Image (tube, rainbow, N blue to C red):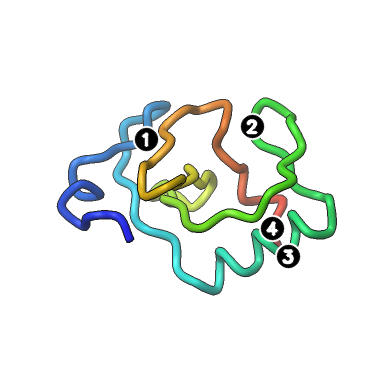
Amino acid sequence: MINPKLVELLVCPENRTPVQEADAALIDKINAAIAAGSLNNRAGKLIDEPIEGGLVREDGLLLYLIRDDIPVMVIDEAIPLEQVS
């Protein structure tokens, strides 16, 4: 689990809005889409490995991955959440 104090300091690198940790239900939906082979990152690359967590931008449009408890705040690696129903 990522340190909550770190999450408070982080912002979306694209629009500088706050992020919050994704809940388990969203992570489950994302992992189901990954398993179905239907999820791409912002750069268009197919995501083929389940994720352990993520940070959701305040407007709910993007999720930044958390890998090994480290947030990956790279815009092109973010997951556009409109792909997840």
Sooner in the amino-acid sequence: mark 3 or mark 4: 3
Q: How many marks?
A: 4
Query: Which amino acid type corresponds to the residue marked 3 in the rendered image?
Result: Ala
Sooner in the amino-acid sequence: mark 3 or mark 2: 3
Q: How far apart are marks 4 and 2 (CA)?
A: 13 Å
> On screen, 44 above or below 3?
above
Query: Which amino acid type corresponds to the residue marked 2 in the rendered image?
Result: Arg
Locate the C terminus by quadrant.
bottom right
> On screen, 72 above or below 58?
above
Q: Distance between the residues labelled 1 and 4?
A: 19 Å
Left or right: 85 with respect to 22? Answer: right
Sooner in the amino-acid sequence: mark 1 or mark 3: 1
Badge 3 vs badge 2, beta-carbon distance below 8 Å: no
Q: Distance between the residues labelled 1 and 2?
A: 14 Å
> On screen, 9 above or below 60?
above
Which residue is located at x 33 percent, y 61 percent? 1
Q: How far apart are marks 1 and 3 (CA)?
A: 25 Å
> On screen, 26 above or below 54?
below
Query: In this figure, which residue is indicated by the disc labeled 3?
Result: 32
Query: In this figure, which residue is indicated by the disc labeled 4?
Result: 84
Sooner in the amino-acid sequence: mark 1 or mark 4: 1
Q: Position of residue 16 (x, y in %)?
A: 31, 31
Query: Which amino acid type corresponds to the residue marked 4 in the rendered image?
Result: Val
Badge 4 vs badge 2, beta-carbon distance below 8 Å: no
Residue 48 placement: quadrant = top right
Query: In this figure, which residue is indicated by the disc labeled 1?
Result: 12
